[in-house]
Amino acid sequence: MRKKLLFFFFFLLNLFHAPANPVEYGIFDIQYFNRREYHGATQNWNIAQASNGLLYFANNDGILEYDGTHWRMFPGHPNLTNNLPRSVFVDDEKVYIGATDEFGAYEKDSTGNFHYQSLTDRFNVPDMGDFWNIFKKDDQLIFQSHNGLCIYTPEKSVDVIPAISRISEAFMVNGMILAHDDSEGLMELRNNTLFKIPGGETFVEKTVSSILALSNNRIVIGTMDNGLYLWDMNGIQKWNVPASNFLKEANIFCGTKAGEDFAFGTIQSGVVIVDSGGNIRMIATKDKGLNNNTVLDIFTDRQKNIWTALDNGIARINYNSAVSFIQGYFDIGTGYCMEKKGKNFYLGTNQALYTITSEKFRNPMKDRTDFHMVEASNGQVWSLFVDEVTDKLLIGHNLGIFHIKNEKAEPISPPSLNGAWTFRYLPGNKDMLIVGTYTGLVLLKRNKQNSWDYYRSIEGFWESSRFIEWGSDGTLWVAHGLKGLFRLSFNEDYSRVTKVETNDDFNGISNFQGFSLSRIDDQIVFTSPDGIYSLSDENSFVRSELEAYFRESGTFPVQLRQDRYHNIWFFVNNGVGVLRLQEDGTYKKIDNPLIPLKNKLVEGFESVFVLDEETAFFGIEDGFGQYSATNDVNYYQPFQAHIRGFRSQKKPDQLFFSSSDSHSQKYVPTFKFKENAFDITFSATWFGGGELEYSTILEGFEADWSAWSNIQNRQFTRLPEGEYTFKVKARNVHGVQTRPASFKFVVLPPWYRTAWAKTAYIVLAVMLLFTIMWITNRIVEKSRQREKLHQQQKYREREEQLKREALENEKEMIRLRNEKLRDDMKHKEKELANSTMHIIHKNEFLIKIKEELQKARKAGDKDVIEKKIASVVRQIDHDIDNEEHWEIFETHLEQVHEDFLKRLTEKHPNLTAREMRLTAYLRMNMTSKEIASLMNITARAVENNRYKLRKKLDLEQGDNLVDYIMKI
């Protein structure tokens, strides 16, 4: 009795002091893997995780390895042929497995590939059937089969502890190894012996399927058909908590801890998550994303994700998340708005308006039938509005404006009104509502029954008015995504718009597209892709202080919404976040917990409904997402990068592996130069939400890390010979980076650039040098001999040639001398003949003058004498200017100065014969007096003729006439 009272006391203490968990209205995101994705059999039995984050699954086809992106099946072994792996465990880079009558370990070789070593063969272990579980305690590994336990001391021995009857299951909890024997109940392994525990007989003829620690001295025991039990180290009692009866019907098959919660895998109902108070938090079944209700093993990884080995496939539940989803199975359509009125939630979707009671909405066992479509609400629901006065609900619908009456949607607006967006009270008047519609604005008026009636449409403005807010001056601001901003002024009864101000009337904004607006701290804030603005005066916009929270990212939100707690929710890059108000009046930007919602929101129609300070709902493409701020989520857990395949394209079957936890590389492969083309794939063991990015570098070839990218492979070709280290690091959406994973390799030079080749080149070069020198010497010697003979021959030929040339020259000289003698003789003969003729002519002339003088002497008449003398003078003058004398002179001049007169005539064709004569005399360097005598003129006349000649020759002042003539 005292034990029962003590148990009851501890039970109550647990209930009152159990940590409060947030209500999960939805189901955490589930990722399902079918056999076509992991390339194995449908059935999976056990899950384990290595220290580097890699996951291992005991699949009917073998051991599967998963790195977050790629699946790999371990190589087979004769002992494992047609032998189904039942269990897997990882310790110190060894992957231990249990199968039928077989257990052993996969060990890595120097390349990172695994090879199997059988321990049953090595230590001659007898056949013991299927090994279902593997544990490690201290330095020993325990392999459990139905027929007993095998305790393996590495590299030493295997001790066999036979079952008393049949060991159905074994567990490790709080450092204890517990085994369930069908006939003895629950037992503990101590010093290689099984001992009964107090109260262990409770489980005789029961199936114990899960044992989990509630605390250091309290343990929860799950059975397949009898629900939950609690062991406080003194005794075992039924754990009568809300989850026990459900789990009794669901048939627990396995279990694991997920933080402070319990995650049970069942035969009938998939995964059931129970908090430490025994309350069900979530149920994930085949219909709700698990794809199979039979869970054969359940495992929580280091990032608090829950993995399930299913009868058909593998699934991951993103339990390390603050976001859950009401989607898929519930089949309510795309979410656009949500409100809570009284005890009911209302969910507006593209299909209709749905309602569900708070009690059922909070119940993790709810199903799709708990969501009721509000009658006559079929179609697109855009918005919901709760009247502050009457708490009545209005609906902005594609077909107009509706209100809810007796859980039925009744129209308020006339049939001609299509599409209602937004509701706002008139300034200072909560009996009138202005509604933004597809085609302008309408008014609603409260009637005497406190219901709303359609009053009238507002004249003068017909644009779509989805975003509307009242300004402090009584004007209404309207934001249109394509047309920009409008500010509307009304008459007194708001029946007509009296003034419409548009983009051209405002200052401070250049691009008015994509605007929305909202009221924050009683001021209108305008948001667009270019920034966040507020009014500084009547028509001028300035940048809002809220921009400071978004400048670092460079992207501004498309919408802002302030809740009643003054937190500001923002939608940006198809994701969502919140600026949470701090005590000092500043905001703290929070977006990491909301990353699972990214790319699931309804783009352009983002919505948020804040239930309380800790819970918010968002419309998504297939329903609604729920954010719980109190979820204990660690977003900054470390994880690791992995090189999942390094191979040469010439040897595609030779793979190398590496991880960021590898301390040293045991083997550095070398590749021939002709194998110099590499494919590298990599990944990271981050199993949370959001995409991963990678940065890489090939040291020895690249100087800097590459830009971050989600690409998970690289290729390198035609690398120069040398040593290289490829490194990769990963970064998750929360900014956490891994340590780099690295892989070293060597590219050998081509055969013609190897050390042996270079040595051979040197030897060949030396030999070639000596050969060239010897050949050169031989060639030089032969050339010298040939040159000597050639010179001798050439000398003889030259000597003969000179002799011939001397003889010919001598003959030529004789000939030229003879010709000169003949020319001289002819010249002398001509000169003699000319002189003779000149003498004859002169003699004849003198005789004639003599005769004339004798005749004059005989004449006595003075006139006759004078005439005779004048006649003599004329004859003398005629003789002096005789052309024959000039021709003789010209002939002699040409002999002395060859072609002078010809060149003179060609150069100056306008010269007269007298001027030609003067030029010839100047050529002979005669004085003016000599020239005057020859030309029978005075010396002064010669000077005048020289002056005229200068002009005809176009000589400048200062040019020497004689020098010019001599040059001709």
Image (spheres, rainbow, N blue to C red):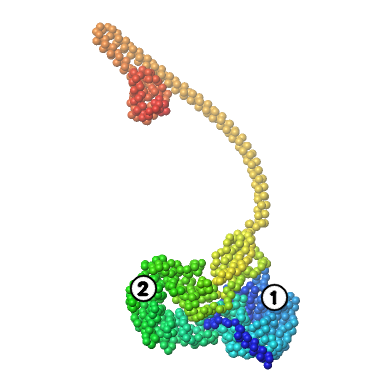
Q: Are marks 2 and 1 in contact (CB under 8 Å)?
A: no
Image location of residue 754, percent across then percent down: 65, 57
Which residue is depicted at the point 45% across and 22% down?
A: 822
When the figure is inspected, residue 230 is found, relative to residue 726, above or below; the finding is below
Amino acid type at mark 1 = Gln
Q: Quadrant of the N terminus?
A: bottom right
Which residue is depicted at the point 67% across and 50% down?
A: 767
Which residue is depicted at the point 67% across and 83% down?
A: 217
Residue labelled with disc 1: 117
The quarter holding residue 692 reads bottom right
- Mark 1 surroundings: few (<14), some (14-19) or many (≥20) residues within 10 A: some
Residue labelled with disc 2: 488
Tally of numbered tags:
2
Q: Quadrant of the C terminus?
A: top left
Residue 217: numbered disc: none
Q: Position of 334 compared to 301: left or right? A: left
